[in-house]
Amino acid sequence: MREPADVVREHLVRALDWEDAHVGFDRAVAELPPPARGVRPPGFDYSVWELLEHIRIAQADILDFCVNAGYVHTMAWPDDYWPGDPAPPAESAWSESIASYARDRERLKRLAREVEDLTALVPTGQGSQTYLRALLLTADHTAYHVGQIVAVRRALRAWR
């Protein structure tokens, strides 16, 4: 019989990229034509590029918070969590952002599996900032913005 903590860990790992109830990150950003990546359709505040970068930046910050013993929160909200322009600065930036997001997601999955106590406070955190909270926050934040990516793609008629 598996330990309850192991079941929770595996659910956390799955939550970081699952598609049980909605489209996941990988599918949401797949096969978007380059000209559509930086377009803000009427009625939308963000392009897919802006949303992709925001997800990547926020996830990287949460990961750093969890694994860096010298972490100090220096990023200003909201400016430091969003790219400066609606379009990628170069063609390669799109694939680099997706690859960076994927690497950090894998590191978060490893953290979920390996941290000794998920309910322990992150050493550089305060209040109720546990590893469990950080992992759930990452999954929830990503899911929210993935929904926005799909909505923007639909408005651009770039969703199938």
Image (tube, rainbow, N blue to C red):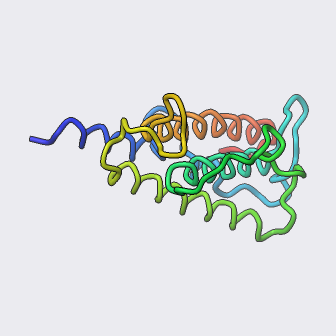
Q: In x, y percent, where is residue 22?
A: 52, 35
Q: In x, y percent, where is residue 91?
A: 81, 69
Residue drawn at x 78%, y 38% as measured from the top left: 77
Q: In x, y percent, where is residue 113?
A: 33, 51
User: Observer-nearest residue: 79 or 39?
Assistant: 79
Q: Residue 98: which quarter of the image?
A: bottom right
* Residue 98 drawn above or below residue 150: below
Is 12 on the left or on the right of 133, as rendered?
A: left
Residue drawn at x 30%, y 49% as measured from the top left: 116
Residue drawn at x 57%, y 52% as measured from the top left: 26
Q: Residue 8: which quarter of the image?
A: top left
Residue drawn at x 77%, y 38% as measured from the top left: 152
Q: In which quadrant will I find the C terminus?
A: top right
Is 116 on the left or on the right of 159, as rendered?
A: left
Task: List the single residue furthest toward the bottom.
Answer: 92
Q: In x, y percent, where is residue 69?
A: 52, 56
User: Observer-nearest residue: 111 or 56?
Assistant: 111
Q: In which quadrant will I find the N terminus?
A: top left
